Amino acid sequence: MTRRTNRLPSGQRLVEAYYLATPLFFLADVVMGLSIRVSALGDPGLRYLYYTFALGCGIVARTRPRAAPFVGIAESSLNVLLLVLSIMLPIFQLPDQFLAGEAVSAPISGLRLANFALSGTILVASFHLHQAAILSRGTGPACHSGR
């Protein structure tokens, strides 16, 4: 009987586990109302679409290891942009709310801050891990630029 060993570096295992844990985040959202991974998306349809997309990224990364770095770079780049916008847009709207005489409240909730910390950490780690994997195998445009 042979024992299968996981030869992925610990950072890559963490990123893979984060993607493959998407169904748990989905259940926390649906059953307990905790949208930790996608607190900025208010519409349930958009959240469910995101969960499907993230799980799909995890499945592709797991089943097609050679494509995993490219999937990871694309997914993390898109999500870093969305994460920054989810924090900045409510802050940018504060002056308009104030000038319109509307009640101004804190733009960042505890749940959104938890989402930012959890997702931001994983997304930045994912980006750098996948970038290093692409550069180390000598594929991609950066590898052919003479650097």
Image (cartoon, grey):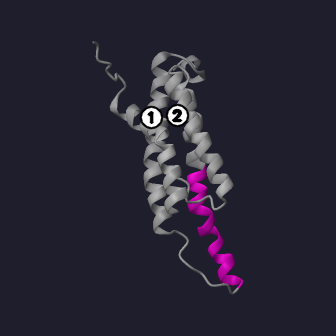
> Residue 140 location in percent, x, y?
58, 21
In this picture, is 56 found above or below 138?
below
Count residues near mark 2 (Cα–Cα under 10 Å), then give few for <14, some for 14-19, many for 20+: many
User: What distance separates the C-alpha of mark 2 from that of mark 1?
Assistant: 6 Å
Identify residue type, mark 2.
Gly
Question: Which residue is disc 1 drawn over?
Answer: 16
Q: Is residue 69 visible?
A: no
Q: Residue at x 62, y 84 (%)?
A: 103
Q: Is residue 99 shown in magenta?
A: yes
> Residue 58 location in percent, x, y?
52, 34
Q: Is residue 81 visible?
A: yes
Question: Which residue is disc 2 drawn over?
Answer: 58
User: For numbered disc 1, what is the local secondary structure?
Assistant: helix
- The residue closer to the viewer here, 74 or 91, is 74
Q: Residue at x 55, y 38 (%)?
A: 55
- The residue closer to the viewer here, 5 or 41, is 5
> Residue 48 location in percent, x, y?
63, 50
Q: How many marks?
A: 2
Q: Image quadrant for the N terminus?
A: top left
User: For numbered disc 2, what is the local secondary structure?
Assistant: helix
- The stretch of residues the image draws in magenta is 82-100
Instruction: Compare marks 2 and 1 and give the one earlier in the sequence.
Output: 1
Q: Is residue 18 left or right of residue 96?
A: left
Task: From the image, give the main secondary structure of the stretch colored magenta.
Answer: helix
> Residue 37 location in percent, x, y?
51, 53
